[in-house]
Image (cartoon, rainbow, N blue to C red):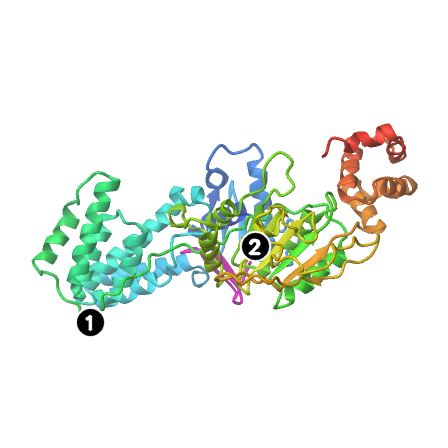
Amino acid sequence: MLRFEVLGPLRVLRGGTELALGFPQARALLGLLLLRPGRAVGMSGIIDVLWPGPAPAGAPNAVRRHVGALRRLLEPGLAPRAPGRRLLGRTGGYLLAAETDEVDVLRFRALTRRGMRAAATARPEQAVRHFTGALRLWRGPVAACLPEPVRAHPRFAAVDREVVRTAQMAADAALLCGRADQVLPSLRRAAATDPLAEPLLARLVLALAACGLQAEALAAYEAARAGLAARLGVAPGAELAAAHARVLRQQVRPARRRVPAAPVEPVRPFVRPDQLPPGLPVFAGREAELAELDALAEEASTRAVLISGPAGIGKTTLAVHWAHRAADRFPDGRLHLQLGGSAARRAALEPAEALRRLLAALGVPAQAMPTGVPALAARYREVLSDRRALVLLDDAVCAGRLLPLLPAAPGCLTLITSRSPLLPPTDPSVPQTDPLLPRTGPPATPLPTGARPQPVLLGTGTRPPPQNPPPTADVRALPLDLPTAVDARALLARRIGAARVAAEPGAVEEIVQRCGRLPLALALVAARAVSRREFPLGALAAELADPVQEAEPFGRTG
């Protein structure tokens, strides 16, 4: 059975296991359809939500691709192009078919309707039970993991307002029957998410007073008054002012049970970032390396894997391909950061800026970020402390810059790509006893051609560990060698077509040899072959044999 959750972070669970929902626009599409299950949303409405700015000409085709991906996710084994029974096409749009007990927002609305009927028939105690049952399904801002421009769309904002209205009705019923203590936690949370909603704030003030928290009620009013003045330039309206007056005159019916004056943490959205770059559709080979990554990820001690190798050997392509393949192991987020260690015309990303970008992706607002690398790193590890997340750090160059970016949580895994196998420091201020470096010994010897790289456990340094340190003795190294000749031919076949490769095997062998089996070189030659389909591969191989022509396809790549 599937369970859909949108009253908070967007989640889909099958048998208790959370599913990886794919690209951000696919998640946004699913979130949109979950707002009104069983009701079709037109293509124009979908495009309006998925592209807050001007939509590209190919937007409808992109929507159809996302629909196909979601169908396969929700119904594994579904035949290609089959509509299935979950995500159904309707004239000019799509709908999500689901039962009330499968979707939290449907259960929320059903309980809210029951509460409204009970309140309308003078049964406030039953109304409170139904309203509080609905509010227990609310886990935070609606579809909290979606990008803010998407969440700001009126369709999502309308559901946030539904929650606020239910909290207000719950407060009205609770104040009537002396059960304000039962709704106070939900009122506090709702007010934290919408601090300018005066009707809600008025009820919060009254509920606090009813629970015996007179001082907190007056403080809540004063905070609301100051917030309205600062952000809107207005004074409290009649409803909020009347609530304040009732508290001052002690005209609020006390609740049957008083509650302690304990501050409640404001609701913070649990953001599940999915920043992985798109995988390469024509990926081929590297089965041994993929199996190695699978095995390393299964080991409880592994915190990070360093994939190293020369430029053009396919480090990032391998890391991104494996990350997509293993995405369901990391349901709490997939982060990606380009460190720019080998960029020729710009400096590598500074650790402080890298940490700020990672924290922003995890939902930490800029004003809540500390200053300084140590404090930023501690906050980053705190946010990830109870998550199962994947972090892909691309193009690292220096261990001293990398160390603050490594999470310490046992559920997290960091993939690092670098041209250097041991990440020697390039900054003279970085001590040579960095935890990512071996203590002693000569530089690593390059692998002989064709040899299988073996995972290496990197040694620890002698420097005292910092407070809340990342793991240092469980970073595994995976040196990346050239692909085998078989994999190199498969790479060409995926890019230019198996029939074309089979028709000229001799030319293919020469191309592979001339390119030295380097994936980037093979990709450039394949791109040239695809752009000149009438050109025989033999002629292309002959061009590569000519020293003047051979330099041309690769001389401008850097």
Q: Is residue 121 visible?
A: no
What is the residue that sits farthest to the top in this orientation? 548
**Marks 2 and 1 close (CB-CB < 8 Å):** no
Q: Position of residue 71 (x, y in %)?
A: 58, 53
Front residue of 327/288: it is: 288
Q: Quadrant of residue 57?
A: top right
Instruction: Tell me which segment is drawn in magenta.
Output: 1-20
10 Å neighbourhood of mark 1: few (<14), some, or many (≥20)? few
Q: Which residue is mark 2?
A: 403
Q: Is residue 207 magenta?
A: no
If the image is split into quadrants, where does the C terminus sit? top right
Mark 2 to mark 1 CA distance (whole Å): 51 Å
Q: Secondary structure at mark 1?
A: loop
Q: Nearer the viewer, residue 412 or 310?
A: 310
Please name the amino acid that badge 1 sits on. Answer: Arg
Q: In the image, what residue occupies the spot 55% across and 48% down?
A: 275
Q: Position of residue 138 (x, y in %)?
A: 37, 59
* Dot 2 amino acid type: Leu
Residue located beneath label 1 in the image: 257
Q: Which element is circle 2 on?
A: helix
Single out the residue that lies furthest toward the left. 249
First-in-chain label (2 vs 1): 1
Left or right: 512 in relation to 147: right
